[in-house]
Image (cartoon, rainbow, N blue to C red):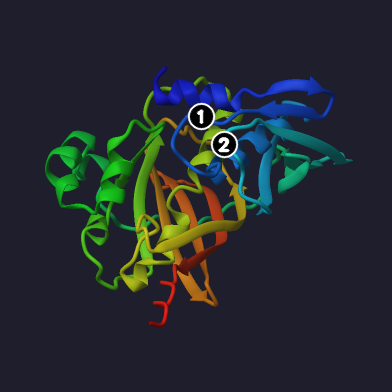
Amino acid sequence: MCAVAELLDILDLETLEQNLFRGRSPKDRWQRVYGGQVIGQALVAATRTVPPERRPHSLHAYFLLGGDPKVPIVYEVDRIRDGRSFTTRRVVAIQHGRPIFSMSVSYHVEEPGFDHQAPMPAVPMPEDLPGEGLLKASVMPRMPEPVRAYFERERPIELRPVELERYGERKPGSSRFHVWIRATSRLPDDPAIHQAVLAYASDMTLLDTSLSPHGRTVFESEIQPASLDHALWFHRPFRADEWLLYAQDSPSASGGCGFARGLIFTREGTLVASVAQEGMIREKRTPPEPEA
């Protein structure tokens, strides 16, 4: 099964009962469930309880406990409100009898209104950046082993970082980071699937941006990263299997936590989504040597 087919299978939750769904994790080597997977699955669970003419426009999530990839995740949906224009759902993800994640999702009927957006940053287009083949052949050998292992395995989301050099050296850099993203093969035409896939992808590089000013990355064994919360707003239609620019920046890091924001644009410059996240970015402490 290719990576995208497996992702679609993971997002296709099993219905247990009304408002109750079950999802599984991929068979990989992660010690904890990837946060974007839980966001995507929770969004699928909530969307299945909402009329199809209403689309999600925002979600706000909290990661409570690390997920266990060896056992299924049960998603319980609470139908908070069904109004004339807006619908609200609350989702709780449960493992081992305890909540590991909670999320509120708001849905909205399509309607006309005022329209403006932030401009897309001027960055190279994805075809002007190293592709997967060139990355593996020429760039990856110079990368730290954890970064190399991440980029070399088959993934459902292709990444083309603009500031790729930050992965090759520990050098403090800008608090801004840009990466082009897309699903590695074509997705079905259902907009709900594209929203779930983007929700999945939105957690992939955002927290890492908060380490860029310090010349560090979440791939280092000395860094202990964990997403704490995640917010996502959908603004306009898009396809997650076409190139999207994820323009990220980190206004602050303090007290063991990093805060980062992201704007997601189509290659034509249309702003389709906004993201914000705070996460833990602790540096692991070396235990003191025992006294002689």
Q: Could you say which disc has been placed on residue 68 in the image?
A: none
Residue 267 visible in rendering: no
Residue at far bottom of view: 291
The amino acid sitting under disc 2 is Pro
For mark 1, what is the residue? Answer: 26
Residue at far front of view: 292
User: Is residue 15 placed above or below 149 in the rendered structure?
Assistant: above
Q: Quadrant of the C terminus?
A: bottom left
Bin the neighbour count of mark 2 within 10 Å (Cα to Cα): few under 14, some 14-19, many 20 and up: some
Q: Earlier in the sequence, mark 2 or mark 1?
A: 1
Between residue 280 and residue 118, name the one nearer to us. 280
Between residue 233 and residue 35, name the one nearer to us. 35
Q: Which quadrant of the view contains residue 177?
A: bottom left
Q: Taking 132 as reference, is 17 left or right? A: right
Tag 2–tag 1 contact (CB < 8 Å): yes
Residue 195: where, in percent of width, then height?
Answer: 57, 35
Residue at far top of view: 1
The amino acid sitting under disc 1 is Pro
User: Is residue 51 placed above or below 203 in the rendered structure?
Assistant: above
User: Is residue 259 placed above or below 92 in the rendered structure?
Assistant: below
User: Is residue 69 placed above or below 228 in the rendered structure?
Assistant: above
Find the distance from the CA under tag 2 to the CA under tag 1: 7 Å
For mark 2, what is the residue? Answer: 69
Residue 260: where, in percent of width, then height?
Answer: 50, 63
